[in-house]
Amino acid sequence: MNTALSHTDPIIISYTIAAVVLPLFAALINFCLPEKSKLSGWISTLAILVGCVLSAIVFARVWNLQPLHTQKLWFTIGNTKVFAGILLNNISVLMLLLVSLIALPVHIYSTAYMKHDNRYSRYFTYLSFFCFSMLGLVVVDSLVLFYAFWELVGFSSYLLIGFWFTKDKAVQANKKAFIMNRIGDIGLLSAIIIIFAQFHTFDIDTLFGEHGLVKFMGPDKGLWTFSPDRMPSNYGSVWVRGTMTKLPAIWQYIACTGIFLAVAAKSAQFPLHTWLPDAMEGPTSVSALIHAATMVAAGVFLLGRVYPMFTDTELTVLAVIGCFTAFMAATIALTQNDLKRVLAYSTISQLGYMILAMGVGAYGSSLFHLATHAFFKCLLFLVAGIVIHEMQHIKEKNDLDIDPQNILHMGGLRKKLPLTFIAAVVGSLALIGIPLTSGYLSKDGILIQAFEWSEGRSAWLKLIPAGALFTSWLTAFYVSRLIVKVFFGEFRLLKSNPEIKFHISDGGWQYKLPLILLAVCSLFPLFSFNPFFYESAWLFNGLKPAEFLARENIYHTIIPVGVNILSVFVMYAAYAIYVKQNTFSFPQTGFLYRLSYNQWYLDKIYKKVIVKPILGLGKTCFWFDRNIIDGLIHLIERTSRMVASIAAWCDKYIVDGFLHLMAALVQSIGNFARKFQNGKVQYYLYSMLLIVLVLFILKILI
């Protein structure tokens, strides 16, 4: 492999390593503190604050400049040298800063949200460990290290999802998340093994960098080799050709399938998406961190890292799956009444947009939407946390038997929670993609480029941008439904229980400050001074491919105008249906409603088609093991014991009996002979005479 590194900066490398390991140190310190120690929250918050500052410095020194790459020999197996190092380019420093920026308000929020929990210190131990895992994932330069941190992210999320392990639903949720992510991990590991078998290196920059090996490789004439349509005429690195094995093309497809499985599991794409809604059993602050910008974004980040790996056909498959996932999740969110579950399906839908964007070649827009979505989705989860927290207080104070997450019990909370309401509106408008928000810039970029991509393609592929467009209107409806049911109209719980007493508020500064920070970051100025053109966003310009050409066509006008005009009508329709209640209302029956409410029956299908057969197979194997294998072993055991008993009897009564007989005989002969050895001469004479007589008689007889 080529170990000549183009650019190193010891200070920036040190800052990067410090930003990564500070949360790990905080986790180790918190692990040693008492479980109820409030000091742990501030230790973790300080660590992530310092890490955020260091990440910002690293970002400023690397963004749109020469990538920074340094590595050292880690270990050697045979002739294979495995290196470990840091790779900093635009995508990695963006994720480094993004994870830190999202984690900081979540940590501040958590110090208040979790203060009454008996395992307060354990919570921050897990939270810091998760941040360390995610930060390490985005900066490492080796597929081996990437896989190690990938597993750590999955493990730490397992701990956080099941943090309230005394609740059976939480335990089931974290096991479900863990198992589904293991499916993706097997795919990623398989892909890494295949890539190494082909290129004999784990180095991400060597493989997927600007002049990486994979960029000029593809299936060609049944082999995975240099593809003429990928390799430019001026590319003449002959030395590279000698370092590769010409594998059959099928292995390229298998490797891409493995990567997709990893992406689908981590980023909750069909068909491995069903763990994410169940993961809402964890603390809401965990949902804000893991399910907004970090763990679920890891799949999109992986796609960004290995993007040159995919052929046009494989990217089209990604676009189809992303579009279907976005649409499916949006339809499910329409009828859900659990506040966090609506946001969970919204996350799945938005991640579908990102995968769709990768599939249609909108690489920059996909990562741009990842960044903007992180802020407004984290904001909405923190808003949900405050609402649920206050509803839980009402439930406990009045001894009510209600679900504090059910939006059917809410309504009219904008008067009691004014700051929370404003933050919710900002986050919702950004999620819908209304102008002057960051979501407008990133989502419209995806829609416009999707329509441009569909030009000249088959009619079936034109359904992809059409589906994405329709999904954006579904998003406008379910988000508006959520807001009006929670914050508008009458407080339905008070209406059904007039005697209850309650006093709720936005909470202290630890609640308010994160909401304000995230709300500001959900508006357009953070990303572009031009609120209407995504091409003007500095983040998009730093991530778009070098060959990107801005195209001014009808899509750049009709898509934003059409989407937003209809979105406004959809938002008003939701307000009229659920607040005024004097217009059309959707029937709560029928096939489509049941399909949406039951999450397309996918969990039931998985349970019937996969879980039950596997459990049945397990029970069959258990019966076979218990009755056949164990029965055979027990039969052999009983037979062996019987043979051993017979052998012991024979040994005791036959062998030992014969030996005892011989011993007794010898003893008798000895005793008899001893009588003749008493030292008296006359006995010796008598004996001799007796022997002579016996011999004489025998002689006569014979």
Image: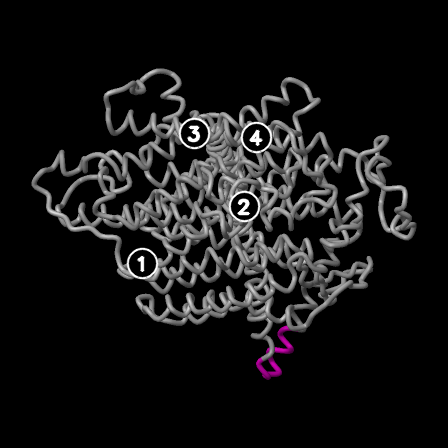
Q: Residue 567 carries which label?
A: 3
Residue bearing the label numbered 2:
530
Q: How crowded is mark 3: few (under 14 residues within 10 Å), some or many (20 or more)?
A: many
Which mark is nearer the camera, 2 or 3?
Answer: 2
Image location (x, y in percent) of residue 593: 36, 21
User: Which residue is nearer to you in this view: 106 or 399?
Assistant: 106
Mark pair 2, 1: CA separation: 40 Å
Query: Of the residues shown, which amino acid type is indicated by label 2?
Result: Asn
Q: Identify the residue at image location x=59%, y=75%.
A: 676
Which mark is nearer the camera, 1 or 4?
Answer: 4
Mark pair 2, 3: CA separation: 21 Å
Q: How crowded is mark 2: few (under 14 residues within 10 Å), some or many (20 or more)?
A: some
Q: Is 344 in the magenta?
A: no
Q: Identify the residue at image location x=41%, y=56%.
A: 517
N-terminal label among 2 and 4: 2
Q: Identify the residue at image location x=41%, y=58%.
A: 105
Q: Residues within 10 Å of mark 1 (few under 14, many from 20)?
A: some
Which mark is nearer the camera, 1 or 3?
Answer: 3
Q: Identify the residue at image location x=57%, y=30%.
A: 557
**Residue 613, can we see it?**
no
Whether 476 is drawn above or below 690: the answer is above
Mark pair 2, 4: CA separation: 15 Å
Residue bearing the label numbered 1:
114
Mark pair 1, 4: CA separation: 47 Å
Asked if labels 1 and 2 touch by Cβ distance under 8 angstroms, the answer is: no
Mark pair 1, 3: CA separation: 37 Å
Apparent side of residue 429 relative to residue 216 in the rendered image (left or right): left
Asked if labels 3 and 1 touch by Cβ distance under 8 angstroms, the answer is: no
